[in-house]
Image (tube, rainbow, N blue to C red):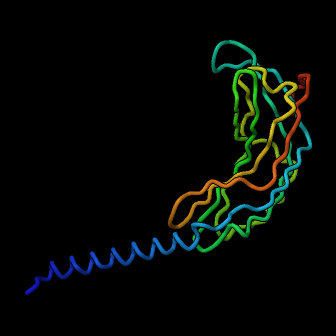
Amino acid sequence: MNTVLSRANSLFAFSLSVMAALTFGCFITTAFKDRRVPVDIHVSRVMLKNVDDFTGPRERSDLGFITFDLSADIKPIFDWNVKQLFLYLSAEYTTKSNALNQVVLWDKIVLRGESTKLNLRDMKSKYFFFDDGNGLRANKNITLTLSWNVVPNAGILPLVMGSGHMSVPFPESYETTKSY
């Protein structure tokens, strides 16, 4: 005859097996969903300064400032397996010293139940846009892209790029004003 402990162990193991199967079912129903949405990025102002870089050798580095507008409807991304989205705007560009530079300029977390219409106007970059040298000056191909990480209830964390990006030319001269 089975003891109470062996019956409890069997019940616990069966419950865990059922929960694992349900979790896998939750994952597989949304695993192959296309999570791209159209994104509209518009840059209204670009400013470039040459400032002292205190992180390394005492040289001067480029510091860029960008004011942008961003609009997107991210409602189609949310389904019953999405807890939140981590949105971030990044800049990609090449310089003589680096084949690929990537800098995150702005980010936002959107939780389930919050407004899913992004209509941001005159946003300034949240993080510094430093280059490790003078690669921003007169750079004609700095591409801004909105991407997001989907944080699901169960499953993998997909990294998705929005379908829409913008190339921004940077000025050939530095600003000398004190404010942005």
Place of residue 130 in the rendered image (x, y in percent of width and height, measured from the top left): 73, 29
- Compared across the picture, whether 123 is left or right of 132 comes to right
- Compared across the picture, whether 104 is left or right of 141 comes to left
Residue 120 occupies which quadrant of the picture? bottom right
- Compared across the picture, whether 73 is left or right of 6 comes to right
Is 32 rendered above or below residue 4? above
Q: Of all residues shown, which one is farthest toward the top?
A: 58
> Which residue corresponds to the image point at 45% horizontal and 72% vertical from the top-left?
23
Place of residue 140 in the rendered image (x, y in percent of width and height, measured from the top left): 87, 32
Is 166 rendered above or below residue 8? above
Q: Of all residues shown, which one is farthest toward the left?
A: 1
Place of residue 148 in the rendered image (x, y in percent of width and height, measured from the top left): 67, 54
- Compared across the picture, whether 137 is left or right of 5 comes to right
> Which residue corresponds to the image point at 53% horizontal and 67% vertical from the top-left?
153
Question: Looking at the image, how many numbered discs can be counted on the residues?
Answer: 0
Q: Nearer the viewer, residue 155 or 53?
A: 155
Residue 116 occupies which quadrant of the picture? bottom right
Q: Nearer the viewer, residue 31 or 82?
A: 31
Residue 118 occupies which quadrant of the picture? bottom right
Query: From where the camera sits, is residue 108 visible?
Result: no
Query: From where the camera sits, is residue 113 visible?
Result: yes
Q: Of all residues shown, which one is farthest toward the bottom?
A: 1
- Point out the image quarter for the C terminus: top right
Place of residue 79 in the rendered image (x, y in percent of width and height, measured from the top left): 64, 72
Q: Nearer the viewer, residue 93 or 50?
A: 93
> Which residue corresponds to the image point at 56% horizontal and 74% vertical from the top-left?
29
> Which residue corresponds to the image point at 64% horizontal and 21% vertical from the top-left?
55
- Point out the image quarter for the N terminus: bottom left
